[in-house]
Image: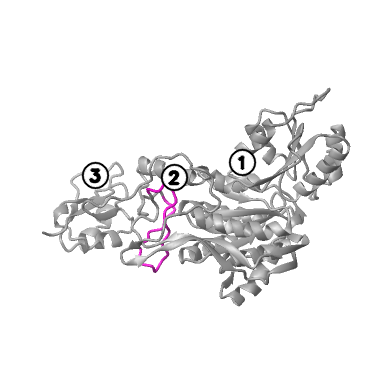
């Protein structure tokens, strides 16, 4: 008995008689012209004799609009399931184990690899440490374009990648840079680029494409003062909201904020691990101060790395797993890959007029991050056990804030610091928990319970803090292209004055 196949044709995508490639290429005469026109006035093709299909899939392969799908009868296309409650926090969670599919073994998950830099203490700039962190994490492709103040990352990668068997490509602009990185990732290579404000603005369209196609990659944005060209060599933190909302469609994103040269190394490794773990682009949201700062860092002999779960399969964009992260095959590994930025089903076939497919896809893309906040949220707390007030800071400004908090405590002020190492998804629960645990002042204390947010912009993170706490929030903004002087923060903590 011959095997039966299900042939589906999306009339909304079909070009009809002006194309008819399926009708001409099908050896069994499965397709015929429909007897009715669509609302757009097109006479589409229809599946006239589905029982005649032998599963050669010529129609599916040659359809320029990806309007046709052929599946064996009884085979189910994997679609995302309903959200499931997140389990307990696990430091290195076990993922899909390697399996045999089509005679090929898949793999991926956590592994320990030897470092690419000699173990011990090194004296590096933040940008150099970022490049070394990428290499240690397994990055073997860099596509980039020089832009102050991130250019040292590109220079270091251009020199070091050939030494570890990787590839460096200077692209013609930032649009091409991220596009090349996405392509290299689909070839199975851990990939990265680096830029600053104006270049990041050019990348956001491709950033949205990486989100939609679930492409793991790392983008380092060494922030500088803007808008537009602004001050090319001066620090700022004005790209926080752009990192999350710069791409249209409202996607969830991961962004990390290092405050030291050591964290430029460590968080770049973590960025690659998160990118591979969740199949997403991850942004290292540094700033000029950290990028050009020189400090000693400690390099361990081995690095804990996550490698994407990969094996050939028919549904690289859908999963029944609770974590919502499908395995990711690479081109050339036997999978029938269709990679599109349009709304698509679990197999990658365009379903641009299907509201159910769009809803499932967008919700899964968000859920696979929001349901795993325990693996993404990253922070450090200082002096919060008895704090009456809380300073929330990130990046290089957190260095100034820590000094000011320490000095304020020496002068009798009960103030603590919450340093955010991850900014997106915003750690709502973490901020709310520390703000709600503030100790009521013993006497007077009309400023008790206050949350203070110093940042080198006009209050981008302060607005997020206001959204998730009930305590009064005070923003200490600065946009003059200079690092916030810790004495300014101290004066506010002692006397409540913030000079504009």
For the point 30% across and 53% down, the residue is 67
Quarter of the view holding residue 95: bottom left
Q: Residues within 10 Å of mark 1 (few under 14, many from 20)?
A: many
Query: Is 12 on the left or on the right of 256, as rendered?
Result: left
Q: Residue at x 27, y 43 (%)?
A: 38
Residue 45: say if magenta.
Answer: no
Front-lying residue, 101 or 39: 101
Which scheme is used to colour this image of the protein? Answer: one colour
Q: How many marks?
A: 3
Rendered image: mark on residue 261: none
Q: Residue at x 84, y 45 (%)?
A: 486
| Mark nearer the N terminus (1 vs 3) | 3
Label 1 or label 3, whichever lies nearer to me, is 1
Image point 55% across, 44% down: which residue?
Answer: 373
What residue is disc 2 on? Answer: 364
Contact (CB < 8 A) between labels 1 and 2?
no
Q: Start and end of the magenta stretch?
A: 320-342
Task: Judge from the rendering whether residue 486 lies leftward or rightward of residue 230; answer left or right.
Answer: right
- Magenta span: chief secondary structure: loop
Q: Which residue sits furthest top? A: 444
Tag 3 residue: 37
* Residue 189 at least partly seen: yes
Question: Few, some or many C-alpha atoms within 10 Å of disc 2 (few <14, some 14-19, many ≥20)?
Answer: many
Question: Judging from the image, what secondary structure is the residue with disc 1 in?
Answer: loop
Instruction: Between residue 207 and residue 372, name the one nearer to us.
Output: 372
Looking at marks 1 and 2 on the same chain, the residue that comes earlier in the sequence is marked by 2
Front residue (pair 468, 34):
468
What residue does disc 1 label? Answer: 427
Q: Position of residue 89 (x, y in %)?
A: 54, 45
Residue 385: where, in percent of width, then height?
Answer: 73, 36
In this rendered view, identify the residue nearer to me: 385 or 341.
385
């Amino acid at each position: 008995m011959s095997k039966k196949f299900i042939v589906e044709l999306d009339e909304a995508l079909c070009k009809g008689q002006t194309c008819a490639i399926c009708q001409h290429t099908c050896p069994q005469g499965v397709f015929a012209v429909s007897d009715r026109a669509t609302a757009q006035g097109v006479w589409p093709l229809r599946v006239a004799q589905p029982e005649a299909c032998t599963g050669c899939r010529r129609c599916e392969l040659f359809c320029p609009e990806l309007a046709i799908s052929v599946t064996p009868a009884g085979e189910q296309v994997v679609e995302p399931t309903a959200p499931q409650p997140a389990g307990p926090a696990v430091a290195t969670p076990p993922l899909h184990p390697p399996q045999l599919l089509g005679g090929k073994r898949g793999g991926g998950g956590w592994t320990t690899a030897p470092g690419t830099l000699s173990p011990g203490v090194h004296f590096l700039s933040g940008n150099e440490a970022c490049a070394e962190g990428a290499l240690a994490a397994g990055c073997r492709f860099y596509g980039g374009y020089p832009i102050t103040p991130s250019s040292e990352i590109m220079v270091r990668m251009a020199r070091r990648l050939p030494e570890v068997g990787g590839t460096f490509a200077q692209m013609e602009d930032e649009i091409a840079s991220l596009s090349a990185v996405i392509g290299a990732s689909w070839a199975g290579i851990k990939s990265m680029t680096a830029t600053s404000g104006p270049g990041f603005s050019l990348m956001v369209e491709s950033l949205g494409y990486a989100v939609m196609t679930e492409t793991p990659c790392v983008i380092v944005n060494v922030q500088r003062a803007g808008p537009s060209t602004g001050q090319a060599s001066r620090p700022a933190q004005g790209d926080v909201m752009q990192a999350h909302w710069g791409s249209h469609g409202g996607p969830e994103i991961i962004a990390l904020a290092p405050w030291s040269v050591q964290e430029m190394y460590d968080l770049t490794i973590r960025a690659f691990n998160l990118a591979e773990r969740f199949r997403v682009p991850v942004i290292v949201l540094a700033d000029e101060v950290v990028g050009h700062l020189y400090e000693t860092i400690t390099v361990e002999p081995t690095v804990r790395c996550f490698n994407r779960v990969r094996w050939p399969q028919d549904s690289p964009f859908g999963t029944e797993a609770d974590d919502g992260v499908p395995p990711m095959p690479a081109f050339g590994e036997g999978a029938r890959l269709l990679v599109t930025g349009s709304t698509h089903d679990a197999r990658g076939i365009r379903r641009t007029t299907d509201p159910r497919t769009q809803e499932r896809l967008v919700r899964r893309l968000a859920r696979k991050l929001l349901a795993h906040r325990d693996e993404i949220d990253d922070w450090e707390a200082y002096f919060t056990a008895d704090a009456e007030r809380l300073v929330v800071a990130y990046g290089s400004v957190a260095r100034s804030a820590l000094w000011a908090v320490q000095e304020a405590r020496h002068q009798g002020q009960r103030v603590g610091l919450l340093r955010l190492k991850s900014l997106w998804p915003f750690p709502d629960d973490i901020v709310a928990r520390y703000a709600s645990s503030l100790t009521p002042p013993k006497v007077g204390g009309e400023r008790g319970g206050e949350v203070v947010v110093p940042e080198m912009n006009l209050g981008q993170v302060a607005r997020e803090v206001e959204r998730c706490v009930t305590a009064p929030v005070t923003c200490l903004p600065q946009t003059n292209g200079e690092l916030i002087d810790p004495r300014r923060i101290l004066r506010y903590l002692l006397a409540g004055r913030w000079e504009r």
